[in-house]
Amino acid sequence: MATVFPVIFLSVAALLLNVVVTRLVALEREQIGTLKAFGYETRDVLAHYVKLVLAMVSIGLVAGLGAGLWLARGMTAIYQDFYSFPYLHISLEPAVIFQAVAVTLLAALAGTLLAVRRAAALPPRWR
């Protein structure tokens, strides 16, 4: 359960991010072409959408880490009462946080890579 459920969850999240960014690129197609016609480079467009995805994922990471810690404290209190433990200590290792953040960012960027590449590949639009 500890390996299968996170993979399924991150795959669904990557798919949803791909759908959202693909639709966003489709809506902003004319603006992207106009910006490229005014001299914005492909890497500038790429960087914009990557930063947008990273901003969305960062909000989710902060909320998820906070909610996870809060739920862990609640679950520990339940275990302590149920099993009559005198004291249970919650420890959240920095390496685990770093690993969770890295895997989440990797999944998010992998899920939006195709949509971001499509946005960067749009030709300049001249009228």
Image (cartoon, rainbow, N blue to C red):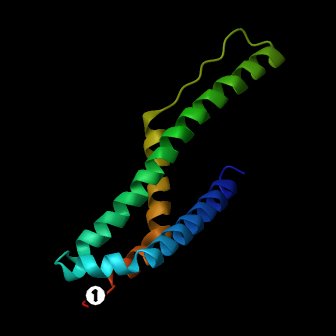
Within 10 Å of disc 1 (Cα), the crowding (few <14, some 14-19, many 20+) is some
In the rendering, at what x and y percent does residue 61 appear? 49, 44
Q: Relative to 87, does residue 117 appear above or below in the rendering?
A: below
The residue located at (47%, 40%) in the rendering is 97
The residue located at (45%, 60%) in the rendering is 106
In the rendering, at what x and y percent does residue 78 appear? 77, 21
Looking at the rendering, which quadrant does residue 36 occupy? bottom left
**Residue at the extreme left of the image, as rendered:** 39
Task: Name the residue that disc number 1 marks.
Answer: 125
In the rendering, at what x and y percent does residue 47 appear? 29, 65
**Residue at the extreme front of the image, as rendered:** 127
Q: What residue type is labelled 1?
A: Arg
Q: Relative to 18, does residue 93 appear above or below in the rendering?
A: above
Q: Is 118 left or right of 76, judged from the image as shown?
A: left
Q: Is 54 left or right of 13, judged from the image as shown?
A: left
Quadrant location of the C terminus in the rendered image: bottom left
In the rendering, at what x and y percent does residue 13 appear? 59, 60
The residue located at (49%, 75%) in the rendering is 22
Is 86 or 125 nearer to us in this picture? 125
**Residue at the extreme bottom of the image, as rendered:** 127
Q: Relative to 5, does residue 83 appear above or below in the rendering?
A: above
Tally of marks: 1
Looking at the rendering, which quadrant does residue 8 occupy? bottom right
Q: Is 7 left or right of 109, judged from the image as shown?
A: right
The residue located at (48%, 61%) in the rendering is 108
